[in-house]
Image (cartoon, grey):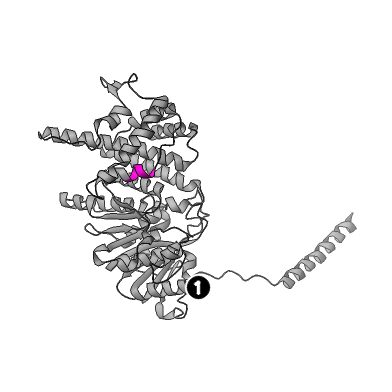
Amino acid sequence: MFAQTFKNIDDVLWKEAGCSSELDYTEQSSWMLFLKYLDDLERERALAAELVGKPYQFIIDQQHQWSRWAAPKKNGAFDHDNALTGDDLIEFVDNQLFPYLKGFKLRAPSPDSIEYKIGEIFGEIKNKFRSGYSLRDALELIDSLQFRSQVQKHELSALYEEKIKNMGNAGRNGGEYYTPRPLIRAMIAVTKPQIGERIYDGAVGSAGFLCEAHDYLRHPKDGSKLTTSQLETLQTKTFYGKEKKSLAYVIAIMNMILHGIDTPNIIHTNTLAENISDIQEKDRFDVILANPPFGGKERKEVQQNFPIKTGETAFLFLQHFIKSLKAGGRAAVVIKNTFLSNSDNASKALRQELLQSCNLHTVLDCPGGTFLGAGVKTVVLFFEKGAPTRNTWHYQLDPGRKMGKTNALNDGDLKEFVALQASFTDSDKSWSVAVQDVDQAGFDLSVKNPNKEEEAPLRDPQAILDEIAALDVESAEILAGIRGMV
């Protein structure tokens, strides 16, 4: 329904001098999509209020409403005579619209309100259009999109996810913006979140984990329908996230809105700037799903917030996640596979902390190329807070092909993992290790698959040379025989 419109929007952005990458395309599409969504939402609410004879107070004042400046209508048709364009449009957006929207952060009743989210978003991004004519073209395309039915919202969310995927694959740090959705779905299948539990991602990125968890809970596999109370819980008291980077924050908000969460509980902050000793029981969560940044480095003052000092961002996040879990809470966290065997003191101390304070029941070893553009191998740690580890079940994921853009991970690749993990079944790809068998000095968790056939050892160089010499002699004899026959 809307796929061609999205392509046309990208074509407009591609020709715009102020936009030079997929990141720019997604950012600029996001703020326009958000304002169009907000306008549709407000008109729905106003109509519902009118039907029951109640007044409706618009969030956006009349001068700054989408239907006034972005898509003015006359007798139901686009009013070209009164539509701003060219320099007038750029001047209005840069000097009136964005400052007005940014001001909502100061005027909002609370950080949980949609008004606050509006202020946060427009305090973080800028209009990058330089041509008011290109912007006018883009606005008219965005205006043709509708958010009124579930079918429309579902298609828009799928198209937006595709934009996030393209953005993630556009640069070296693909994993920063896009975690493969089949991997996320497998992590959710193992952790099994329930309605009423609080789900958290402290490195939320584009909110892929929270969106997939929402879809999992919103559409139960048994086909049952959620009650009104359950739907309200899903909307307001289930999904929580934090994000440091401005662009990712904006995309996370828009992604969750398109997946059906009207006012996402996403906070724009550096998660690691918080001292984990300040985390109280009320701050803890039932389920944590996350893919913290690979290879980041944090300053010394940030490291002081953690008992195990390290500059490795992912290791600080892992400490934060362990502390943020409730007793009995479950987590699934993506991390570089070197975490399992690094010999530095911080890595060993962190592995010890994980094994002693949590039940690290499963390690999923992902093949190279799982994260396009990231250039590192990863594992997923599945653990439960409150009891020490006794046994860890390992699974070595092997799709049987080289991973890449045209051979990306799919749900079928993880089907066996999810099935075997439910009962910790051993196979040629899976095995269990008792924690008592782990080196207690280094807590090395990098265990080789004992069920995999050993590859033939490399041959001795002298044996290879002897074989070559023998073949040379044999060839010479054959050649001499042929010459004798001529």
Q: Which residue is mark 1?
A: 344
Q: Residues within 10 Å of mark 1 (few under 14, many from 20)?
A: few
Residue 254 among those drawn in magenta = no
In the rendered view, tell whether residue 485 sits above or below residue 45: below
Q: What residue lies at 46% left-to-right and 48% top-to-bottom?
A: 168
Query: Which residues, given as a range, are shown in magenta?
Result: 120-127
Residue 150: percent from the left, percent from the top?
A: 26, 40
Residue 474 in which image quadrant: bottom right
Residue 148 appears in the picture as rendered: no
Q: Is-magenta flag for residue 123?
A: yes
Q: Percent x, y for residue 34?
A: 32, 39
Residue at position x 41%, y 43% in the image: 162
User: Eyeballing the image, is 284 above or below 93?
Assistant: below
* Location of residue 136 by image quarter: top left
Give the percent coordinates (x, y) of residue 216: 29, 53
Disc 1 marks a residue whose amino acid type is Asp
Quarter containing the N terminus: top left
Residue 310 visible here: yes
